[in-house]
Amino acid sequence: MVIKVFLASSSGSTAIKKKQQDVVGFLEALKVDYAPLDIACNEENRMWMRQNVPEEKKPSNGIPLPPQIFNEEGYCGDYETFFDAKEDNMVYAFLGLPPPPGSKEAEQADKALIVENGTHAEETNAEESLDESIEVPVEARNGNAHGEEEQEAEEEEGEGDEEEVAEGETAEEEVTEGDEAPADEEEEEEAVEETDEAQAEEEEEQVAACKNWHVSSVCVPVHWKPTDSKTLPVT
């Protein structure tokens, strides 16, 4: 990766020259490889710089001033952002480069990584403790075994209820048959009584008829007077 620094070698502004010298001197002190690109003598460099500086980073007049810093095609910033990164010991991050081992920026990065990992570890431990503190339902621990036991128990209860219903129906049928049986017996007894009464009436009628016949054929009228004892009917 090549760091590109766009400069104006023939600028009449003292402030611009000072800023350019500050950027170049610091990069040389850090031994960072960079490529100075003059926009005063090269119109192509000037047009490329103006086209690749983001619109939000351009001044109100729309013309960015040097120095402007790029990492290959990626925009890093102008002098103000470079100065802030230098004050915060974040120049390598500003340039998009890995900090060299042993540098202050590398030490800060390591501390930040340790803090991040430590915080992440604490969060992980807290989540594990929370998971352990949450009571796991019996069904979740035992899987579907508990649910199957409950289902079997419900099925057994359902079978027991069906047997009770069947027994109840059988008992009702027996009671119904028991009620019908006495009714049949009563009807038979009434029929027998009626038959006996009819027979008795018939017998009485026969007896009455015989009596009438016997009296008419055997008995002698009261006003009859026999003239001869031999002519009396024999009883």
Image (cartoon, rainbow, N blue to C red):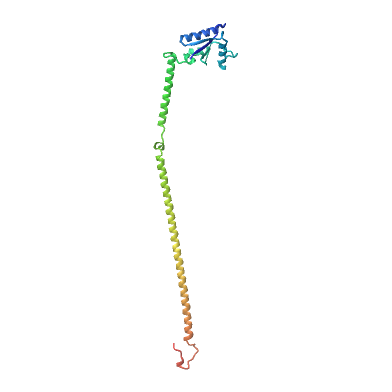
- Across and down, in percent, residue 10 comes to 56, 6
Q: Residue at the location (46% across, 74% down)?
A: 199
Q: Residue at the location (45% across, 66% down)?
A: 186
Q: Residue at the location (41% across, 31% down)?
A: 131
| Residue extending farthest bottom | 228
Query: Front-most of 2 and 77?
Result: 2
Q: Is residue 213 above or below residue 51?
A: below
Q: Is residue 52 above or below residue 121?
A: above
How many numbered marks appear? 0
Query: Front-most of 154 and 16?
Result: 16
Q: Is residue 3 above or below residue 134?
A: above
- Across and down, in percent, residue 94 comes to 49, 15
- Across and down, in percent, residue 205 comes to 48, 78
Q: Which corner quadrant of the image does residue 133 belong to?
A: top left
Give the quarter of the figure containing the C terminus: bottom left
Q: Is residue 201 above or below residue 131?
A: below
- Across and down, in percent, residue 227 comes to 48, 93
Q: Residue at the location (45% across, 93% down)?
A: 230
| Image side of residue 135 versus residue 16, left or right | left
